[in-house]
Amino acid sequence: MRIYRALLVAQFQSMMQYRLQMFLYVFFSFIRPIIFLAAWSAVAAFQGGRIGSFDEPAFAAYFVTLTLVTHITMAWNSFEFEYQVRQGQLSPLLLRPLHPIHYAIATNVVWKLFTSVAVVAVAIFLAVTFHARFDTQPWHIALGIPSVLLGAALYFTFDYALATVAFWTTRVHAATTLYNRIAFIFAGQIAPLSLLPGPLQTIAYILPFGYMLGVPADILRGGPSFEQAVMLVAGQVVWLVIALVLFRVLWRAGLRAYSAVGA
Amino acid sequence: MRYLRLLGIFANTELQFAMQYRFNLLLEVMQIVIVSGTSVAAVLVLFSYTTVMNGWTLPQMIVLLGVYYVVQGVEELVFQPSFERFMEHVRLGTLDFILLKPASGQFLISFRHFQTIQVVQVLVGMLIVAIGLGQLGADLTPGNALAFVVTLVSGFTLIYALLMVLSTLCFWVVRVDNILAIFWAFIDAGRFPIDIYPGWLRFTMSTVVPVGIAVTVPAQAVAGRLDPIGTVTTAVGALVAWLFASWFWHQGLRRYTGASA
């Protein structure tokens, strides 16, 4: 615990130098949901204001909670890790008594705390301009909060597992693109999971991506019934266990295969 | 004519440069195909619930998405790499060497560098446009085709002018990479017709950051949804923007004193 406090404080200090980057990041974070929210609103308007169980205010609510959930869950280890391996910065980190993952966790948490005020402001702005309507019951929030945290853990662990690819090759970028684009379709970014057509929806509920973003967002919006929500959270737990095992295996195998660049 | 020959030499150099990393090229091609493919899939998901989105049919939307990738590809092929190097030259003081060369400084900084791989992006974009046109049926009149070319070139000019002005700002403030990053945020919104966006965003995308015009208007033209007045207005707007950018560049240049002078 004390280690974490020190890590968090150090990270916070180094992040205060990048206020402009924060502004840009927030800017990016709200263009993407607006794009698809506007598209779905246009489609819904033509179909008499309703698609499936979603009307326009419900779409707005979904994309607002999605913005928040994306912010809380996202991770960027795969980019950073490749860089560290390529620049030879990983070797000294490996020699420290603390697993490198803890530095990554600290960076991740601080960045999110640091930017949260701006992101919440963005979410409120979106909710007001698009007339969002939330059907959230108190139990939705009680389930939604653990669901978001599970989503964050899942996102982080998978991303770190993907990052370990850098132990074998320093061209992680192609793998990351493939991973991100599959997530783009199946995580709930282009559409709420329940609106993906037929087979895509089945695939989305099998793959882990939806459990990172779409599921927590839909629970917080007040979408699923109690039974459905419990099932979805259970799905998150299952995937988290798989992700953790996968990460451990990959990390061990990767460390054995790793030799520093330039060595 | 001389400038065309120079352009050919630049392209050739950059191609040879890129060919050194063949495996990387292959990976990048793969990424371009994945990104474009998933974007088409996203549009198909939307249209599985409707036949029309704000007046746009599916084939028209496919055309629009293709134009989006053509515009993005051209932008990343020439403009982005060249302007990035230009700003670096200002920061490092090496711009002097470019200004001393016996050709227009503006031309040299705008078109010197290529990200050759983005040719593939442009080709993929054109392929998507062709598929959309095929779906649209054979009512592509010569008039529409002409309007398409005119508006597309105007769109490139608008984006060029914007990037030119933004990077010229580096004569006053040395670090402007971050201002350019705002442009990236908006270009993503070009993938859908701008008429579906709320007023403030539509306004931004058609004036300050004209990505929306550059993508939506050519797509309208080829789908036969643009009147001649729209074509002419876009062309005139582009011309004005280009003149302004050149003027602004000269203003900036007058202020330039070299990094250590």
Image (cartoon, rainbow, N blue to C red):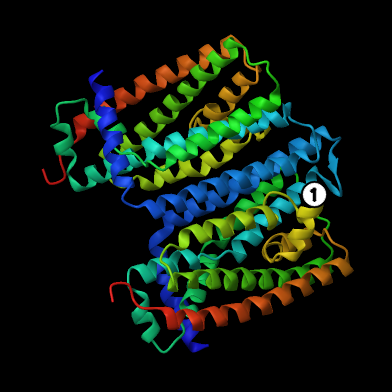
Q: Residue A40 vs residue B227: left or right? A: right
Q: Residue B56 vs residue B74: left or right? A: right
Picture quadrant where residue B101 is located: top left
Q: Residue at x 10, y 43 (%)?
A: B261
Per the image, label 1 sits on a secondary structure element best described as loop
From the top left corner, tell me how far across and down residue A74 is, in percent: 58, 64
Q: Residue B87 vs residue B136: left or right? A: left
Question: Chain for mark 1?
Answer: A
Quadrant containing the C terminus of chain A in the rendered view: bottom left
For label 1, the residue is A197
From the top left corner, tell me how far across and down residue A103 is, in percent: 46, 77
- Can residue A222 be seen here? yes
Q: Nearer the viewer, residue A174 or B113?
A: A174
Total labels drawn: 1
Picture quadrant where residue B110 is located: top left
Q: Is residue A40 above or below residue A192?
A: above
Farthest residue, direction left: B261
Q: Nearer the viewer, residue B2 or A155?
A: B2
Q: Residue at x 44, y 72 (%)?
A: A168
- Can residue B251 be seen here? no
Q: Is residue A113 above or below residue A60?
A: below
Q: Residue A90 vs residue B2: left or right? A: right
Q: Is residue A33 above or below residue B234?
A: below
Q: Nearer the viewer, residue B44 or B108?
A: B44
Q: Residue at x 59, y 37 (%)?
A: B191
From the top left corner, tell me how far across and down residue B57 is, in percent: 73, 28
From the top left corner, tell me how far across and down residue A230 is, in percent: 83, 72
The kind of residue on which mark 1 rests is Pro
Q: Residue at x 49, y 39 (%)?
A: B121
